Structures are given as C-alpha cells and as structure tokens.
Image (cartoon, helix red, strand yellow):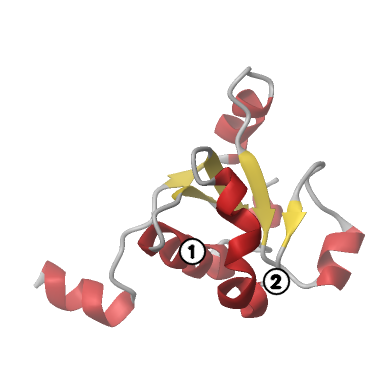
Amino acid sequence: MINLLSSIFGGTSVCSISASELRALLNSPHKPILLDVRQPEEHRQKHIPNSVLIPLGELSSRMKELEKYKDKDIVVYCASGARSASACRMLAQAGYSVKNLAGGMMMW
C-alpha cells in the first residue's frame, strides 16, 4: 500500500524543516544552502537572504548549477511548500541532501 501511494504521489518521501528550525540552523556554523523555487517576481517581493533562485519549471535544466553544493544540505522553499516538495523529490533522486521548508514563505 505504501509503495502504491509513493508511486502515485511522487515516490521519494520528502523531509521537512520548520521555519524555527531553519532560523536556528542559519545561526549555526553548518548553514544550509537555500534554494527558492518560486518565480522571480515572488523572489523580488520577499525572500530569505542568500537564497539561490531557480524556478521549479527550470530546475531540471539548471540542476548542474547546484552540483557545487552536492556535499552540502539544501533547504528548498516556495510560497507554501508544494512546489518545493516537488523540487526536493527531484533533487533527492539526483543524490542531493534536501529538506523542504514546511509551509514555505507563508510560515517564514
């Protein structure tokens, strides 16, 4: 049953991180890479400082840009957490260590 649900809803499960956990992590020596998968207009309005912007629709063609971060943790975010969950699945399948910001910018 779990395998069936996984195949229907995207396969790889996605780990998440809360906004408060991320804030604490950003104040630690082990800062993650922040990946914003929203559109440029959304990023201009509000974003977490030092984020890399790669819209979800461009992620598969621009994934090479993230290769330099393959040995680091990446926290992916969007507006609510849905697009970033999709991005996390793609990145995890490509071998990246990723977490989804639970609730996205709405919770930030």
Q: Where's the N terminus, which quadrant? A: bottom left
Q: Position of residue 5 (x, y in %)?
A: 20, 75
Can residue 77 be seen in the rendering of this structure? no
Does residue 101 appear to the left or right of 86 in the view shown? Answer: right
Residue type at mark 2 is Pro
**Residue 93, quarter of picture:** bottom left
- Disc ID at residue 5: none
Instruction: Tell me the residue at 51%/46% (across/down).
Output: 70
Among numbered discs 1 and 2, the one appearing first in the sequence:
2
Q: Residue furthest left?
A: 1
The residue indicated by pointer 1 is 85
Does residue 52 appear to the left or right of 35 in the view shown? Answer: right
Q: Name the secondary structure under disc 2.
A: loop
Q: Residues within 10 Å of mark 1 (few under 14, many from 20)?
A: many
Along the viewing direction, whichever of 95 and 106 lies nearer the viewer? 95
Along the viewing direction, whichever of 57 and 27 lies nearer the viewer? 57
Q: Position of residue 12 (x, y in %)?
A: 30, 64
Q: In the rendered image of this protein, does residue 63 appear above or below residue 73?
A: below
Q: Position of residue 69 (x, y in %)?
A: 58, 45
Can residue 84 be seen in the rendering of this structure? yes
Along the viewing direction, whichever of 45 and 58 lies nearer the viewer? 58
**Residue 56, quarter of picture:** bottom right
Instruction: Tell me the residue at 45%/51% (across/down).
Output: 96
Does residue 35 appear to the left or right of 42 in the view shown? Answer: left
The alpha-carbon separation of the residues under discs 1 and 2 comes to: 13 Å
Residue type at mark 1 is Ala
Instruction: Tell me the residue at 63%/17% (across/down).
Output: 29
Q: Position of residue 34 (x, y in %)?
A: 66, 46
Front of the two marks 1 and 2: 2
The residue indicated by pointer 2 is 55
Q: Where's the C terminus, which quadrant? A: top right
